[in-house]
Amino acid sequence: MPESRRYLRFPLVDRIEHWLQVLSFTTLAITGLVQKFPTASVSVWVVQLLRGIETTRLIHRTAAIVFALEAVYHLGSAGYRLLVRRVRPSMLPGVGDVGTAFKTLLYNVGLKKVRPPQGRYTFEEKMEYWAVIWGTVIMAVTGFIMWNPLATTRLLPGVVVPAAKAAHGGEAILAVLAILIWHFYTVHLKRFNKSMFTGYLSEAEMEHEHPLELAELKAGTAPPAPDPRVFRRRRRIYLSAYAVLAAILTAGAYFLATFEQTAASPAPMREAPTVIAPLTPTLVPRPTVVPGTPAAALTSWENGIGALLHSRCGECHGGSNPISGLDLTAYQGALRGGQGGPAVIPGAPNGSLLVIMQSPGNHAAQLSPSELEGIRQWIAAGALER
């Protein structure tokens, strides 16, 4: 029997783009969800495996930049196909997709005997594609807000930061579930599609998934190639315009990564003097803050918050056996919390036990109103460590 004919589905450049997206998306999902659910045992294990929360955040943000640059490339690739090669915009959803979706539903539940034929892209593929586009926009906007909370709150109300955090986390969960439940099942389990590995589909696979496109290919009804001079002119104009757009978008990605520095700059290192220490051990003094520190001075754990909590709360909530298991002398201890739950919930000051216990004004180690307001603002901005 002669070998079945194969049809090119995805050229090599598309397959490379796809696997870069898979790699960056998977990295974002893992490093993002462990931050959304920090007290889960698997999250603690992953963070420890990645050598701490700061390394985890660095990996997450690096993957976000890769994902953003891949989106810039995809925009240029899609524009090249539509404006230069004049490929039909078959990924755009149409009214006919609604009817196809309804007929497919009837077929899946056994009320229709024949599966409705579809063309280059099925309605399922269109839905998934535009969900990625929509999700990328949401994650980019909310990610910028969370990455630059201080700059954001200079222009917008502080409630925008926890709202962005909720939207970012919710969209992340939705995207992961869509990949695991929808994409993974339909592409890898229901009928294993190897086109992202090999680039090709067999004739039998084309007949099952894309019969309308197969019929067009066999009939030879593809549009003719454009005049070479016209094609070169289109390409020259498009590449010139896209080069400017890509430069602007790439600069925007760099702006996102470097716009705001929320950590205090470390002092330059000096050569340590030689010290002759006595044999008698001495107590290391706790960091202190001036009573009534202004709220504006408390911007991150390392820039005021840690010293404040260490000074006010470290007597009871510090050391090897803190009260209620709550250690407020370390950033991770504040996030982890104690027997009553997490003391600090980034983005949710009203739900954080630290604020709840201090708000009545009668705590044993009561913070001043300005200090408590600084704590509130810090938590609302995402409880930054640096």
Image: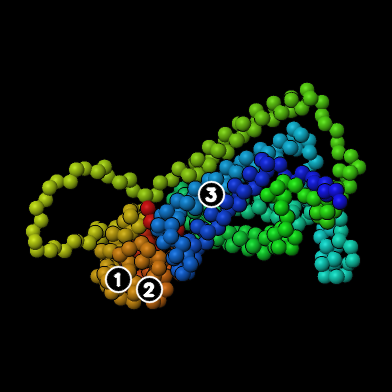
Residue 278, percent from left and from top:
8, 59
Front: mark 2 or 3: 3
The colour scheme is rainbow
- Other-residue count near label 3 (Cα within 10 Å), few / some / many at <14 / 14–19 / ≥20: many
Q: Is mark 2 on a helix, strand or loop?
A: loop
Q: Nearer the viewer, residue 311 or 8?
A: 8
- Which amino acid type is marked by label 3? Ala
Q: Which of 102 and 368 is in front in this view?
A: 102
Q: Is residue 12 visible?
A: yes
Asked whether disc 3 touches disc 1, contact meaning CB atoms under 8 Å apart, the reply is: no
Front: mark 3 or 1: 3
Asked whether disc 2 touches disc 3, contact meaning CB atoms under 8 Å apart, the reply is: no
Q: Distance between the residues labelled 3 and 1?
A: 36 Å
- Residue 19 lies, with reference to residue 46, above or below; the image says above
- Which amino acid type is marked by label 1? His
Describe residue 50's horizontal placement relative to residue 327 as left or right. Answer: right
At x 25% / y 64%, what residue is drawn?
A: 311
Asked whether disc 1 touches disc 2, contact meaning CB atoms under 8 Å apart, the reply is: yes
Q: How many marks?
A: 3
Could you tell which of marks 2 and 3 lies nearer the N-terminus? 3
Residue 129, percent from left and from top:
70, 52
- Residue 46 lies, with reference to residue 130, above or below; the image says below
Q: Distance between the residues labelled 1 and 2?
A: 10 Å
Q: Which of 304 and 367 is in front in this view?
A: 304
Could you tell which of marks 1 and 2 lies nearer the N-terminus? 1
At x 68% / y 49%, what residue is drawn?
A: 197
What number is the disc on residue 338? 2
Q: Name the residue under label 3.
A: 64
